[in-house]
Image: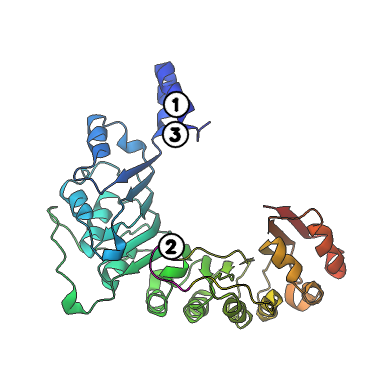
Amino acid sequence: MRNDRLALCNCTLACRTWLLVARPYLFRCLSFDTSLRRVPAIQRIRNNPDIAPLVRVLELKHGADFNALDLPVATAAFSRDPPQRSEFSKVTTLRLTREFAFTKYTASLLSILFPLVDTLNLERCVARSLESFTTILCAFPNLRTVDLNDVEWLHLPTGDIEPEEDIPFSMLPEPRLASSHIDSLSVGFDALCPTIAQWFASSTAYRSPRVLKGPLGLNANALRTLVQVCGEHAEHLHLSIADAYHPERALLEAAQLDLSSCLSLRSLCLNFEPFPRSRSRSRPPPRRRPTGRNPSRVFALLSTIRSRHLEEVRFLITSQTLREMEWDELDRKLSSEEYLGAVRRVALEVYSALVDDFDFVRERLPLFSMRGVLEFSAM
């Protein structure tokens, strides 16, 4: 019931006892549309000061016109009328979504208002510059988890970037570098490029995540950089290797990825489901799936694994791709003690699964099926 807002609202009307029980769940997650001149929700919370300390997950969003490259006044409006320092001081997860535009001053402001943030999610955001983008990644000293999806900055010459507006907030300090290491780093297709990968590699805080997620495709070199730098510490690796626009390229890049540096690897997830692409900018039209496509090429990367701690391999796959696989080759690799001797679980999670998919795979993995660690689930 804790996720049923209507039920929680009804509980608050029942009696004071139920009110006190339901409110922490009812106000745990809040979302503000900062495109408004003044944010009404903030005003309402100021009239009810008991609510703000209950908020743990806060989303700031607005719908700017990204195509016009017009960094809206919405962020500035939020800055002119920000919450008080004591409000939302217990927020631990901050989400900036739907074309939320930020500058390096925005990062300073957010770091003051939300000092306990340990999870940062940026989705469909735009920054004035690369510096503004990296500044917000270093603004929260307690940061542990970073999720970047469809995040970009303006690629303009320095002289063409308008001066960032000052924020009327007293004594804004410079953003603080994270004082500890990032534990989980997830980078989506449009956020991953050689420039940001090199920045991650040069930042001490971002060089040793235990969980690393990223896509393979046209940006494969950037992902290789992350794997080479972060691989020594990565225990859980999630690779998206299905690109609807360049499917053959993604498979080729996956086959050439070297995981030998991931000596602490405990789990590997290979996602064959096409990952989302950019929201509105021009992209080449989706290509028809090549008839010569061979998804089994990705099995080559299994032979590069040198970790003695690998316990789990997961395949997120469609029924169609599953039937295109050369499972005989995988059976030999999975059955080899040299590569996957310590594996305790191999999971096939199939989208749009057919009734006989599991039997289809099990018949083609006779050697490995005898180990009793093969699991199958329909999505």
| Span colored in magenta | 278-284
Residue annotated with mark 2? 149
Evaluate whether residue 248 shows in this view.
yes
Crowding at dot 3, Cα within 10 Å, few <14 / some 14-19 / many 20+, comes out as some
Observer-side mark, 2 or 3, equals 2
Residue under the point 39% across and 54% down: 118
Report the disc number at residue 337. none
312 horizontally vs 84: left or right: right
Cα distance in 3D space between marks 2 and 3: 27 Å
Q: Residues within 10 Å of mark 1 (few under 14, many from 20)?
A: few
Q: Is residue 11 left or right of residue 163?
A: right
39 vs 46, nearest the viewer: 39
Relative to 65, 233 lies left or right: right
Judged left or right of residue 372, residue 179 is left
Q: Nearer the viewer, residue 249 or 367?
A: 249
Is residue 371 in view from this perspective? no
Q: Is residue 376 above or below residue 262?
A: above
The residues bearing labels 3 and 1 have C-alpha atoms spaced at a distance of: 8 Å
The disc placed on residue 21 is 1
Locate residue 320: give its quadrant.
Answer: bottom right
Image-quadrant location for residue 99: bottom left
Where disc 2 sits, the SS reads strand
- Between the residue at mark 1 and the residue at mark 2, the CA separation in whole angstroms equals 35 Å
Q: What amino acid type is highlighted by mark number 1?
A: Val
* Mark toward the start of the polypeptide (1 vs 2): 1
Q: Are marks 3 and 1 in contact (CB under 8 Å)?
A: no
Q: Amino acid at mark 3?
A: Tyr
Q: Position of residue 7 (x, y in %)?
A: 48, 26
Q: Main SS type for the magenta part?
A: loop
Residue 291 to residue 175: above or below? below
Disc number for residue 25: 3
